[in-house]
Image (tube, rainbow, N blue to C red):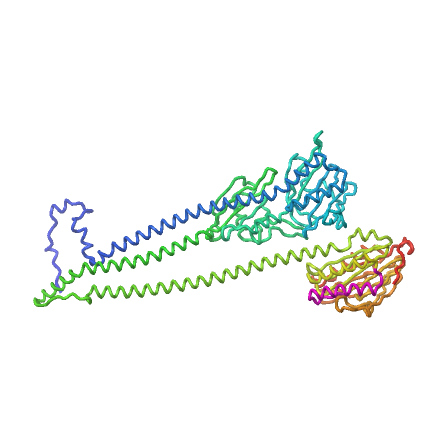
Amino acid sequence: MSASKPESNKKPPSSDALSVSNDKQPLSSKFSLLGSLPIRVVLIAPFVLQTLAAVGLVGYFSFRNGNEAVDDVATQLSQEIISRIEGQTKSLMVAAHNLNQVNANTLQSGLLNLEDTAQLQYYFWQQLQAFEVVGATYFTNPQGRFLGAERLAGGALLMLESSPTEAVLRGYLTNQIGQKGNQIYDKPGYDAQAQPGYDTAQQAEQPTWSEIYTDFKNNQLVITATQPVYDAENNALIGIVGSDFLFLHIHRFFQELQVGYTGLAFIVEPNGELVTASTSAPFFTKDQGVSRQINAVESKDETIQQLATIIEANLGFENIDNVFSSKIKLGQEPYYTRIAPLQDEHGLNWVLVVAFPESDFMSRIYANTRRTIVLCILTLIISVLTGLLLVRWICRPILHLCTAAEELSHKNLDKRVILNRRDEVGQLALSFNRMADHLQDSFETLEEKVKERTAKLASANNQITALNEQLKAENLRMGAELDIARQIQQMVLPREKELKNISGLEIAGFMEPADEVGGDYYDVLETDNVVTLTIGDVTGHGLESGLVMLMTQTAVRTLNEIREYDPIRFLDTLNRTIYQNVQRMESEKNLTLAVLNYAAGQMIISGQHEETLIVRANGMVERVDTVDLGFPIGLDDDIREFISHVAVEISPGDGIVLYTDGITEACNENHEQYGIERLCEIISQNWHDSAETIKSAIVTDLRRFIGNQKVFDDITLLVLKRELSLSPAAEHPVVQS
């Protein structure tokens, strides 16, 4: 061990050295650090640094340029989608105003006689054939007269008319050549001048749009294009022509619209209520059976809800009169968003929003970045290997000299230095190559595993997403089918006006299905002064039971129209018809059915159902068991031998009550049934009132008894009461049994 030199041996700095600044050193001292490093490092470092710098700069500029390119593509895509939606929407909706202009020109020129109702209705009926996007077209004059034609959801066409003296809107089915057929509905208290768009068009004195509203005839959201029509000579107002635009066509276009890969588009009104959207989430709801628009901030689609909330808070839908483009962050995902007003010359004022996530485009940029990193690592490995080979080539003679010098220091002058492939440089190169090979093998194996796992996860996510979309579409389809079936079922029930037109009798009916579509059935028909009452209960409830109910109603109506009053032939023909249809459906549905024919104070009862309640004028109730009067309909192909009937005299003040087991078997929270005895008691207590009041008393008492308990079966009730003022002979002829 050598001893350190004492401090006294150190020489003081010279005056020349003191004159040099502290931040400057002699040139030889600047390279002292490099001189302490191994030559291998000095030679390899430039290759590594140059490779890292070059690849890093290429990756950075590639990523930045990719972002800029994505922004440009996103802007162009959003502009294209906005233009496409605006063009398609306006091209669809302008048809309603074009139809109004054609009708206005025809009326103004006098080609149509405004007093000829049949001619006007047939003209409007013809117009609907050419304009499929229009749901209804009509004309209203200043006196309140209304004439037009309407397209039903199933494709059938109606003729509409309303007189200001009656204030009732009537709808008539038409055949294929435009001939008016049966009346299918009427709406009392109808005021044509109070309909949406009438006052707006009259005040604007030009074509305009109404507000979006719910059409009472089909319970759908519509918007009406209206236009005033003036007399060519004195410029006096002739009336208002209007055409209802069907949102179905815009919604269908939006459902087929592709916004990027996973983007969306929607239209809102200035008040924030949705008009339509490209997502599967509904844009309207039903409030007490009436369709109502959904506010965008309350949408069930989370993306629409978040976008609408941000736009409303920062801009306000009512203030959007220019195009706005922005990148909005929803959670951790940025969305390219473009907001534009959707307006036309007729006062249309909507807001169109298009948005798609940044990941739709950046996924490829991120993939390119990952590839750049992998290439950078591979390039670095190749550079290091190349540097090692170069160092070996340069250092071989230097190592030879070092070895020779070491041998000379040991005075071994005869030793000859022989270079071989197993020296330090060779061993280092071999070790590095083995290490590099192992590293590369490990990296490639790991990368393949990551890709395989990513592919499996992506496949699983795609399958789950496809299944969810399929379930959503199926739920929407089934919901629409049930809603249509329920509407059709309600449409075939007897109307209050029909019941009031039956002289000498008070009749009140009630039916409430347990599900959207019920299996109960009742009907009241009058033919040649013979009143036919039918009531039935199809097994189960739902769409299939509702279909059997509709088939039964149609068959009963047909037999009644051909004046078939014989109980055996009536029920046998009806049973064979239903049985054959049920067999074709491969269904196990059947129903109990009672048929009652009334005329001149006599009631003929046939068919198997619940007990028929005969109520006398003093409130006394007589129960008629119908078990032996028939057999379930649709259960067997031949039931003639089981059919019988009984005749009951119905004096003035007497009547009958028909019901289904949904009333007598309804349970309260204590699992107690309502029962036939309680029903008879309520009938007896209220028999002095009208049939409508008796019906309401029964329903009210039943609801009070059930309370909060869920109703599991359809509820149907029919009350008939003979008036006191008419004699039997004055009412109806005798029915031959």
Viewer-proximal residue among 678 and 572: 572
Q: Quadrant of residue 109?
A: top right
Viewer-proximal residue among 80 and 727: 80
Horizontal side of 727 relative to 351 (left or right) equals right
The quadrant of the rendering that contains the N terminus is bottom left
Residue 350, how many percent across, how many down?
A: 58, 43
Horizontal side of 452 relative to 135 (left or right) equals left
Q: Give the residue furthest to the front.
A: 177
Residue 324, how many percent across, how many down?
A: 50, 42
Magenta span covers which residues?
Answer: 564-592
Q: How many dots with numbers?
A: 0
Viewer-proximal residue among 104 and 242: 104
Residue 463, how many percent across, how many down?
A: 51, 61
Q: Quadrant of residue 368?
A: bottom left
Does 582 appear in magenta? yes
Residue 364, placed above or below residue 542: above
Q: Residue at x 10, y 52 (%)?
A: 11
Residue 464, how many percent across, how many down?
A: 52, 61
Question: Can residue 504 be seen at all in this image of the molecule?
Answer: yes
Does 48 appear in magenta? no
Q: What predominant SS class does the magenta segment belong to?
A: helix
Q: Quadrant of residue 469?
A: bottom right
Horizontal side of 255 relative to 571 (left or right) equals left
Residue 390, placed above or below residue 326: below
Q: Give the residue furthest to the top.
A: 234
The quadrant of the rendering that contains the C terminus is bottom right
Q: Residue at x 19, y 66 (%)?
A: 421
Q: Residue at x 64, y 38 (%)?
A: 208
